[in-house]
């Protein structure tokens, strides 16, 4: 009972409404799935943003740690190398570290670890303050003189070394000779202290300082040397303590700066630990939100599928079965069974409407059967009407035969007239009566024959006039041909004379160009000779410079021999002081003095020879320069001659060009005159041909007969031409 009532209730609903109800069920399922997805995505997004924020904060903290490690390494370079580039690199690294801390504090979620980030400010400010201090120290230590301590030390040491070397070289004082060694020991101590900052080295420096002062204060040191060296050494001794203290203070400040980086590590480690913990918790929340979202979405999808299946089953049972019955009825109707009963006519939905449409189709089939019977009767009536139409066609064929007879009569008249026209009879006319439909054709034919006769009469008159004009053209063409032939003969003689003149001028121009070429070659040879002389002058000058250099070298050798002699003398004096122990050394010193004297004499001989050679080389240079000047004058004269010959050659070439152009013009006039003669002959021949064509035209026109009965006469143009 309930099933039938539910079916009857469903049959009252339209199919569109039932499908809409199923769609609503599916849409509700989709809405539920969407709400579940939206809720789950919200939780996922919140958990993901937390995890993303803590991951970003951890990355920023690692960036801060990397910057601090790099900056600590730079602090060691600043401390040991003391270079401006290291200071600049540390400054840039410090700015990078501050920016990294700023990015860490400005990142999303940083407010949750604000206290740990704030703990980095104190060590960062301490590092910045220590860097400012060490930058000032480095500037005072490494700045150029006179502000920089190291530069002042180097300048003072260099000035002292210069004075010590200049006074000890060539001096006989042994005390003065010991000063360079002591100064070298002081400089070595300076370098060692610069590397190690060992305070014991300062004590060694003071010991060497005392040795230097004692050596400088001995009576054997000349007063002039002492007066020069003592102020320089005093300046050097005053700057050393200042420089060593600056070096020491800079090293301590560098150690303090490096130690500040140890203070930034604990708060940074604490920050990273907190961030790692928070990141792990955010990951757990993200996994929990993901699991909850999946569970909600799967449950909602399952519920939506169940509701959709139930709705589809109900719609199928209330729609598919009636449609199947209706399909069976339609198949029987298609087979020709119009007595089948149509089910579902009482339904109110689309199936009921389809059943009513099938019922209409059934009624139409029944009506068609009735119409087929009526059609057979109509077909018999149509056969009777066709017989009547056949009789009407036979009557129309008889009327068409009379029309063809009239056409044959008109064609015969027209053929006779055209036959007479083909024989040249322009008097032919169609005078016989014809049917009314062909009257226009007769009138058009007669009018065309009249116009053709008028045209032939006009051609007769024109041919006489053309014959007269042809005789006049023939006479004029004969006279023009004779005059043109005479003019061509005169121009031919003028062209021959012009060609001979042009050949003479061309020969003169060729000779001028040959002379110009030879002049240029001579000028080129002279210039090459001048260049060779210049090279010789330069070579002699280089030889002269080399001789002067050799002379300078001999002077140096002479000076070395002099110094060697002095050293040998000092050695002999020291050997004499040593007594018997220095006898062997005295013998060697004597031999050295002998060799030094021989070297001085040889240097003097070489110098005198080089001076004589320089004198001879100078004379040779002057002679070569004179030869170069003469060659330059020869080159200048050759160039003037070449210029003059070139101008003559250019003038001759221009004359030859002008004569060539005149010869070409005369030749062209000769060709034009010959062409005119040919044209005159062609005109005469054309006039004769024209007379022949006129005679032919007269013969053709004479074949036509017109109303005046006249014949066209033949005119003999050749006879008229001979008479002229």
Image (tube, helix red, strand yellow):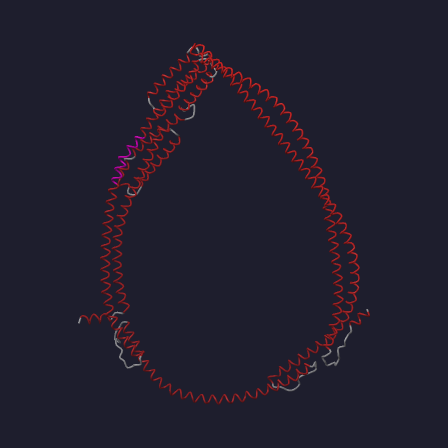
Residue 270 magenta: yes
Closer to the camera in the image, 429 or 561: 561
Whether residue 414 is situated above or below residue 265 in the rendered picture: below
Whether residue 402 is situated above or below residue 164 in the rendered picture: below
Q: Report the magenta residues as a range.
A: 258-274
Where is residue 234 drawn, in percent x and y? 41, 16
Q: Main secondary structure of the magenta part?
A: helix
Image quadrant occupied by the C terminus: bottom right
Q: Quadrant of residue 487?
A: bottom right
- Find the residue positioned furthest to the right: 723
Q: Quadrant of residue 2?
A: bottom left
- Find the residue positioned furthest to the left: 1
Closer to the camera in the image, 555 or 225: 555
Where is residue 24 drawn, in percent x and y? 26, 63
Whether residue 624 is situated above or below residue 689 in the rendered picture: above
Residue 598 magenta: no
Left or right of 677: which side holds 202?
left
Where is residue 586 drawn, in percent x and y? 46, 13
Left or right of 536: which side holds 472?
right
Query: Residue at the location (38% across, 16% down)?
Result: 209
Q: Quadrant of residue 184?
A: top left
Where is residue 336 drawn, in percent x and y? 31, 81
């Amino acid at each position: 009972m309930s099933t039938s009532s539910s079916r009857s209730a469903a049959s009252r609903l339209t199919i569109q409404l039932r499908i809409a109800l199923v769609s609503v069920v599916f849409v509700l399922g989709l809405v539920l799935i969407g709400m579940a997805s939206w809720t789950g995505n919200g939780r996922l997004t919140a958990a993901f943003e937390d995890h993303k924020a803590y991951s970003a904060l951890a990355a920023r903290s690692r960036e801060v740690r990397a910057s601090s490690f790099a900056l600590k390494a730079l602090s060691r370079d600043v401390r040991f190398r003391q270079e401006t580039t290291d200071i600049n690199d540390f400054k840039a690294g410090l700015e990078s570290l501050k920016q990294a801390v700023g990015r860490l504090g400005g990142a999303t979620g940083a407010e949750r670890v604000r206290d740990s980030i704030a703990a980095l400010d104190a060590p960062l400010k301490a590092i910045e303050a220590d860097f400012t201090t060490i930058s000032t120290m480095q500037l005072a230590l490494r700045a150029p003189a006179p502000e920089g301590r190291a530069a002042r030390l180097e300048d003072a040491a260099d000035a002292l070394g210069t004075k010590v070397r200049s006074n000890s070289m060539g001096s006989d004082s042994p005390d003065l000779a010991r000063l360079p060694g002591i100064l070298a020991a002081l400089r070595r101590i300076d370098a060692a202290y610069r590397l190690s900052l060992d305070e014991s080295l300062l004590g060694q420096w003071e010991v060497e300082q005392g040795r230097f002062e004692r050596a400088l204060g001995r009576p054997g040191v000349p007063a002039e040397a002492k007066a020069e060296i003592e102020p320089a050494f005093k300046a050097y001794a005053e700057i050393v303590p200042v420089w060593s203290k600056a070096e020491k203070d800079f090293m301590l400040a560098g150690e303090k700066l490096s130690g500040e980086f140890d203070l930034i590590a604990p708060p940074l480690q604490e920050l990273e630990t907190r961030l790692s913990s928070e990141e792990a918790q955010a990951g757990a929340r993200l996994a929990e939100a993901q699991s909850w979202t999946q569970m909600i979405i799967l449950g909602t999808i399952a519920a939506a599928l169940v509701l959709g299946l139930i709705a589809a089953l109900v719609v199928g049972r209330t729609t598919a079965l009636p449609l199947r019955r209706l399909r069976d009825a339609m198949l029987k109707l298609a087979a020709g069974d119009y007595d089948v009963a149509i089910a579902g006519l009482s339904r109110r939905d689309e199936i009921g409407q389809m059943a009513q449409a099938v019922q209409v189709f059934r009624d139409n089939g029944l009506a068609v059967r009735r119409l087929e019977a009526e059609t057979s009767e109509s077909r018999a009536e149509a056969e009777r009407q066709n017989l009547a139409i056949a009789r009407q066609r036979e009557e129309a064929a008889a009327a068409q035969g009379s029309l063809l007879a009239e056409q044959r009569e008109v064609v015969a008249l027209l053929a006779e007239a055209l036959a007479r026209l083909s024989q040249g009879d322009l008097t032919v006319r169609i005078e016989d009566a014809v049917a009314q439909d062909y009257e226009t054709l007769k009138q058009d034919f007669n009018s065309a024959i009249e116009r053709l006769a008028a045209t032939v009469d006009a051609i007769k008159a024109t041919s006489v006039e053309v014959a007269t004009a042809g005789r006049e053209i023939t006479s004029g063409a004969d006279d023009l041909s004779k005059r043109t032939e005479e003019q061509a003969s005169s121009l031919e003689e003028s062209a021959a004379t012009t060609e001979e003149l042009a050949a003479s001028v061309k020969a003169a121009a060729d000779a001028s160009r040959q002379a110009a070429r030879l002049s240029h070659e001579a000028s080129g040879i002279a210039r090459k000779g001048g260049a060779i002389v210049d090279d010789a002058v330069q070579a002699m000058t280089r030889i002269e410079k080399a001789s002067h250099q050799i002379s300078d070298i001999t002077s140096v050798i002479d000076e070395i021999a002099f110094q060697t002699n002095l050293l040998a003398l000092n050695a002999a004096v020291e050997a004499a002081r040593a007594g018997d122990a220095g006898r062997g050394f005295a013998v060697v010193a004597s031999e050295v003095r002998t060799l030094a004297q021989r070297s001085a004499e040889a240097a003097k001989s070489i110098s005198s020879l080089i001076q004589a050679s320089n004198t001879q080389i100078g004379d040779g240079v002057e002679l070569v320069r004179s030869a170069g000047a003469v060659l330059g004058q020869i080159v200048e004269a050759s160039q003037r001659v070449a210029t003059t010959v070139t101008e003559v050659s250019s003038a001759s070439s221009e004359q030859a060009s002008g004569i060539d152009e005149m010869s070409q013009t005369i030749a062209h006039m000769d060709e034009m005159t010959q062409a005119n003669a040919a044209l005159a002959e062609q005109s005469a021949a054309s006039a004769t041909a024209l007379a022949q064509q006129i005679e032919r035209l007269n013969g053709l026109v004479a074949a036509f007969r017109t109303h005046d009965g006249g014949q066209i006469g033949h005119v003999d143009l050749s006879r008229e031409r001979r008479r002229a």
